[in-house]
Image (cartoon, helix red, strand yellow):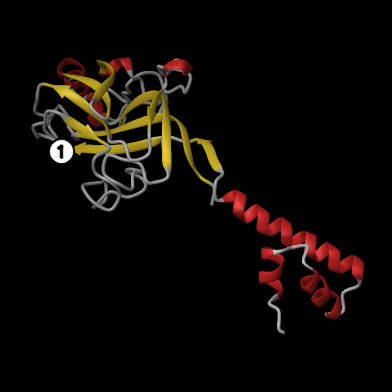
Amino acid sequence: MRYNLQNMIQARPDSTPALKLLQRRNHGPRMAHAAMAAGAMAANLGAVAAGLIDVQQMPLYDRVIVAAATATTNPITFFTVPSGSGTGISGVKQIWDTNLTQAARLEAPRSFMVRAVRFYVEPDIAQSDLVNLYKNYVLALIVGDKQYQLAPIWFFPQGGGAYSNGNLTTARLADTTAQQFIANGAPDPNAINVIAENLAVKIEQGENFRVELQGNSFTTATAGGTTFGVGLNMRCVLDGVLSRQVQ
């Protein structure tokens, strides 16, 4: 009878035929037993790893762009257009625009615990556009059919981004509302609105979720002139804990 050593070790790591076969292949008794033990451990680890969960502090993020001199939608929606589709900064959305791989849900088998909502705007945004966002919209995290964290946009500071104390350009000095960098809150990771641990929002596997800016439409500032409108380049970040199967 011919034996397949690997299958014999995985099926019955203490079997006599497998042990004898190892000894015949120029292994001494001690080496044969060590090889059998290693094979059994590998087989057991393979079975266990399939059910293990990898838990990481890792954000979910998504970008929405509105061009200059363009009316905003109501609502403005995040996390409904995955990577490979929609509009990013260079064609369809890529990893620098979103890490969502499916529309409005997590890739299976994954779940997410939201500990903070962070709303980021690119620092070259026209001041009038950020002011209009504040005046006209509120932000809501929606999981399933339920709204969470409904509040004005300034309630969700970005906690990161560009910071500079340099000089304004000549063109910017001519701006009627001269500015250099502008942000939704201080660029400090401690300056975010953290959800209490016992109130963290759970997104289960296969559960629909999205973030909406809800309110009134407005037209973004025009490019050039004295307004220097560049449109809205916004990112919403769900800061928290991602659970996924070990690979």
Say if residue 193 shows up in the picture: yes
Q: Residue at x 31, y 36 (%)?
A: 207
In the rendered view, tell whether residue 102 sits above or below residue 32: above
Q: With 92 as the anchor, is 96 left or right in this view?
A: right
> Could you tell me which secondary element the residue under label 1 belongs to?
loop
Q: Residue at x 25, y 46 (%)?
A: 88
Say if residue 177 shows up in the picture: no
Tell me the kind of residue under disc 1.
Answer: Ala
Q: Position of residue 222 (x, y in %)?
A: 11, 32
Q: Residue at x 85, y 80 (%)?
A: 24
Q: Position of residue 164 (x, y in %)?
A: 41, 26
Q: Residue 205 occupies which quadrant of the picture?
A: top left
Instruction: Find disc 1 in the rendering and name its residue.
Output: 67
Which of these two is toward me, 27 or 224?
A: 27
Q: Quadrant of the N terminus?
A: bottom right
Q: With 31 as the anchor, is 130 left or right in this view?
A: left
Q: With 76 as the anchor, is 234 left or right in this view?
A: right
Q: Position of residue 232 (x, y in %)?
A: 21, 33
Q: Residues within 10 Å of mark 1 (few under 14, many from 20)?
A: some
In the rendered view, tell whether residue 179 sits above or below residue 224: above
Which of these two is toward me, 235 or 50?
A: 50
